[in-house]
Image (cartoon, rainbow, N blue to C red):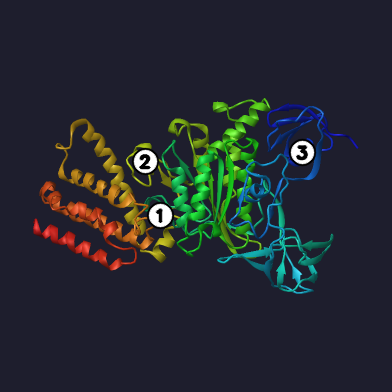
Amino acid sequence: MNTHTIHAINGPVITVNDATSFKMLEMVYVGPNKLLGEVIQIQKNKTIVQVYEDTVGLKQGDPVYPSGEAISVILGPGLISNIYDGIQRPLLDIEKNHGHFIPPGSQTFPLDQEKKWDVKVLFQKGDHVTPGMIFAEVFETPVFKHKLMIPPNIHGEILTIKKSGSYRVLDTICEIQTKDGIITLNLTQKWPIKTSRPVLERHISHVPLISGQRVIDTLFPIAKGGTAAIPGGFGTGKTMLQHQLAKWCDADLIVYVGCGERGNEMTQVLEEFSELIDPRTNQPLLERTILIANTSNMPVAAREASIYTGVAIAEYYRDMGYHVALMADSTSRWAEALREISGRLEEMPAEEGFPAYLPSRISQFYERAGYVETLNHLTGSVTIIGAVSPQGADFSEPVTQNTKRFVRTFWALDKQLAYARHYAAINWNESYSDYGHDLDRYYRDHVADDFNLFRQKLIYLLAEETKLLEIVKLIGSDVLPDDQKLIIELGRVIRIGFLQQNAFHKDDTYVPLKKQYDMMRIIIFLYDQGLQYVSEHKSIQVLKETQIFENIIQMKYDISNDDSSSFDTYSSMIKDVMRRID
């Protein structure tokens, strides 16, 4: 047997003096500490490996050990509430056993091997099983049921199976006779992170991911199983918006991937998530959250792995029939890691030094989102929401532009809005959503027939207001006719009274779709009545002096989320004002 040794070291990239014993994307162990690495290139006489840990201390001639398998995650009960690094090492356990720093080559098992779980077994001896079947259930948290599934590609008959009871994650639960031999199953599965888990069928989603944020749910919605990008410069609120989505969106599970973010920001995320109360269950939000923390001072190669680790875990819970939201913050740091590795491999650079395969890597990531029928005939979804951090808030840079090609929702954050304390700082002129038509049926069945009609009118008024404000900057507002002055006033009502939300107000931090619709209905009614008023050559100034626009702006605070009937009083108020000044 050949001895595999290090021939050259270039940061996280090492060269091994043998190419016959390795497979592409194979996991390897490097050096005396057995650092985790992955084969990324095979040439005639040598193999290139990227190492997911710090290579300080490695030297020429150190051994490299092949594993024969791809880099994989261990899936099973205990993932929820845990905090992992990019290669699924449990950070809390490592801190407990080794202190504040991860020792080189740490092989800590990602799940608690000593904890006993109350397992409810659903099958019995002699039953025939197929991929995806749920053979047992465990309450992973007090509010979350973990479904143990037959792994993909396993067909057979159960030879032995334990009774319901308390078991550790590695205890054998059943034995299955397959055509290839006997397979033993415990509470875990192993799955390669760069391989999508199989499904029966992918569907077009007609169900929105409801966030309670009006600018998202009404103007730029995202479907469950959809994709969205949140591009924005430093300080525009990308992380804050993802926190709000994680807390309030109606996904069953949140997977939050901190990819290359600053350490203090990641610490803040971990502290906040541990303190937040889930409004759906009144339990800590961590009880339906999995955190993957890969900070900017961690090895650069592990950033790439962190994204795939997160999406592999998300697909696992999707296969149980859950709707999962994956927050990736930020994909720009992931792309920068690709650029650094590509530079060390001396590959031909493309635009701004990024590798030529950047678009395909971005598309492969976002394509793993979807609304699917699982192997066990359940319906599940993975929704991917990726933050993008363009340098200097330049949306024309490669990562933003290539992300824009592969996502259907684009929430462009605006520095001026953020600095003006307009939350959420989503620029309504640069953002878009392609899901409006797909979700029309849902709005008709669950909210109102004219929801999308009002939505389009709001978008029209905001676009017209933007054009008119450009004219006002040049020549002032006095020259505008009253119908255009009305559009400017309504634009202000929409911006301040509808799009802007107060994350600290009990009724405004989360707004149900029905209230969003009622608010739209009142704003459009005010516009229609005002248009009729000015068409009779009456002064818009007189209408402004009635304070009706200010009153409509305040309705988001004055009406509680479950008091839909009070909106009729605003309709009456508008009619009374029009009669009084007639």
Asked if one can make out residue 535 in the rendered structure from this viewpoint, the answer is no
> Is residue 426 something one can see in this rendering?
yes
Q: Secondary structure at mark 2?
A: helix
Q: How crowded is the residue under tag 3: few (<14 C-alpha within 10 Å), some, or many (20+)?
A: some
Q: Is residue 124 left or right of residue 397?
A: right
Image: 38 above or below 569: above
Q: Is residue 338 left or right of residue 500?
A: right
Instruction: Please tell me which residue lies in front, 437 or 564.
Output: 564
Q: What's the residue type where badge 1 is placed?
A: Asp
Q: Secondary structure at mark 1?
A: helix
Q: Are marks 3 and 2 in contact (CB under 8 Å)?
A: no
Q: Residue at x 73, y 65 (%)?
A: 130
Between the C-alphas of marks 3 and 2, the distance is: 47 Å
The image shows residue 469, relative to residue 135, as above or below, that is above
Tell me, yes or no, whether the two marked residues, 1 and 2, touch with CB atoms within 8 Å.
no
Q: In terms of secondary structure, where does tag 3 sit?
A: loop
* Vertical placement of residue 472 versus 447, above or below: above
Looking at the rendered image, the quarter that the N terminus falls into is: top right
User: CA gap, disc 1 to disc 3?
Assistant: 50 Å
Labels 1 & 3 near each other (Cβ < 8 A): no
Determine the CA span between mark 1 and mark 2: 20 Å
Q: Nearer the viewer, residue 515 or 372?
A: 515
Q: Which residue is mark 2?
A: 418
Q: At 62% across and 30% down in the image, what residue appears? A: 340
Q: Would you call the spot at circle 1 few (<14 residues within 10 Å), some (14-19), or many (20 or more)?
A: many
Query: Of label 1 and label 3, which has the lower sequence position?
Result: 3
Going by the numbered disc 2, the residue's amino acid type is Ala
Q: Which residue is mark 3?
A: 33
Q: Residue shown at 65%/60% (left/top)?
A: 77
Residue that badge 1 annotates: 217
